[in-house]
Image: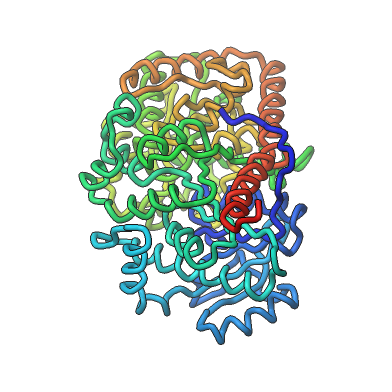
Amino acid sequence: MFLGIIMKNSIKPDYLFEVSWEVCNKVGGIYAVLSTKAATLKKQLGDNLFFIGPDLWEQQESPFFDPSTASPELDEWAHKAKAENLKVRVGRWKVPGDPQVVLVDFRPLYAAKNAFYGQMWEWYGVNSMVGYGDYDEGCTFAHAAARVIESLFKHLCPLRSNAVAHFNEWTTGMGVLYLKHQVPAIATVFTTHATCVGRSICGNNKPLYDYLPGYFGDQMADELNMTSKHSVEKHAAQEADCFTTVSDITAAECTQLLERTPMVTPNGFEGDFVPKGTAFSRERKMSRQAFSRLVECLTGHVPAEDAIYVGTAGRCEFKNKGLDVFLDTMSRLRDSNPEREIIAFIMVPGWVQEVRADVLERYQSGSAFITGLSDPVFTHAIYNYYNDAILSRIHQLGFQNQKNDKVKVIYIPSYLNGDDGLLNRNYYLLLAGLDLTIYPSYYEPWGYTPMESCAFGVPTITTSLSGFGMWCKGIGKDDDILDAVAVVSRSDSNYDQVVTNIANLVLRFAEVPHAEVKVIRQEARRIAARAGWHNFIKYYDQAYDKALKETSLRKGIF
């Protein structure tokens, strides 16, 4: 368990360099971790905090990057970096805190990648011989980012400064190894948000948890054809001055597969983007109207006033995110013929084309409809209609969204950034319109989606296989939706029981009086507040202290 420890004689960094593929590059959960953590770190370090990410923008400028406001010192360094054959741009990351950022173009280093891989083999035994796909891209970025830190340290950090370089995920692992060999005065922290082998085991429908003690990471990496990624990740984990991960459940995975037990630094949260007061009420009302209109256009039926709007969201990882459980739960609820109407929205991006023309025409017409469309279970055309896992399962379960169906399922396979062409509301505003969310994950090292749901005052159901779920159990939450977060016990062998338990929780929620629902929503917000970075940053302080003390030993100072 991660516990708050009051550290005596703790060392704090004077400079912090944090590296991730998702700096100014919104891809997944790591973006949420870093972008929400930035403001808290900025308060501690000011402009001695530097984020380093890939410069991937050619045709247009990154919407997350402001190139005009870097400090004079960073601007001056950028000119010097050119003489060191580093192709960089400096500015600020447009997130709360406005931290300084360096975007590095790593592509010029492709020419040197084989020589670099040779060094990694000689220095540490990293096996790059069977790297494929995004391996070269990730490792070349890591090399470039490490050279950027080496240069920043040389030009900006006074002698004997306490400097920490924090690398996130396997894609940056070679940066850890480079700095340890070339600039041992810099303390290194390496965080794995999900192990390569663990995620691949789950993605290949192999049981992870019941058999974890019997898995050997190197052997499984070879079997799953990811030897090189695992090799980088394992060596970075073992060589970093401090190795961390985001939850107890992933710590067990790391210990077994990477052969080093990490420090746990749970992911925090900042709710700056959550509307408050009357603004929230207004957005919730507008989203519910949008949902109701969407149901009417697809099915020819206007949902009842007391209909329960249930949602799930996340990446399209059918098993890992529990989308299979979600759909089977809705099928179980349909069979139970509940008294209140339940509308389930699956907001998961697929291989999307464009809005269905028949749906869009109805939605924009302003007319009322009493007949449904053909196949009224999805909103946007998708390229892989016959192979999309979510749509195929909806059809397999026989959902037709007829007027009299008490449970209806609607799949919205578009990115919800406010420009999907139909609802044109971003995910967070739509989240505000829900009554209940379900994120029944099988593989979820942390889980921002249920945490975000709490921040919007929407009670949520998650599982004991998510980091957030386990954290909630640690603060006294269990499997009761009246607690705002219900944590359903899940293993490799109780799938049907999980479906039954979640269905019962939804039915229980449907019976809760309106006044009590308000209390539950308030409790959800309190849970999100407890997970704020102001509470969780202490775990990172401990990690930096550990790394700096290791470095002091290496320098013969401590």
Q: Considering depth in this image, is 106 or 26 the residue closer to the camera?
A: 106
Question: 44 or 337: which is nearer to us?
Answer: 44
**In the depicted structure, whether residue 408 falls above or below residue 283:** above
Count all numbered tags in the image, as a single digit.
0
The residue drawn where x is 33% and y is 74% is 115
* Vertical side of 126 occupied by 280: above or below: above
Q: Position of residue 80 (x, y in %)?
A: 62, 84
Residue 285, visible in the rendered structure: no
**Hey, which residue is sitting farthest bottom in the picture?**
83
Q: Residue at x 47, y 42 (%)?
A: 314
Residue 89 sits above or below residue 37 on the image: below
> Where the N terminus falls, by quadrant?
top right
Q: Position of residue 359 (x, y in %)?
A: 44, 48
Q: Nearer the viewer, residue 317 or 478?
A: 478
**In the image, what residue occupies the spot 54% across and 38% down?**
263
Q: Is residue 272 visible?
A: yes
Instruction: Say which residue appears at 66% left-offset and 20% top-offset.
Output: 517
Residue 176 point in image, percent of width and height:
48, 58
Seen in the picture, residue 21 relative to 333 is either above or below; the reply is below
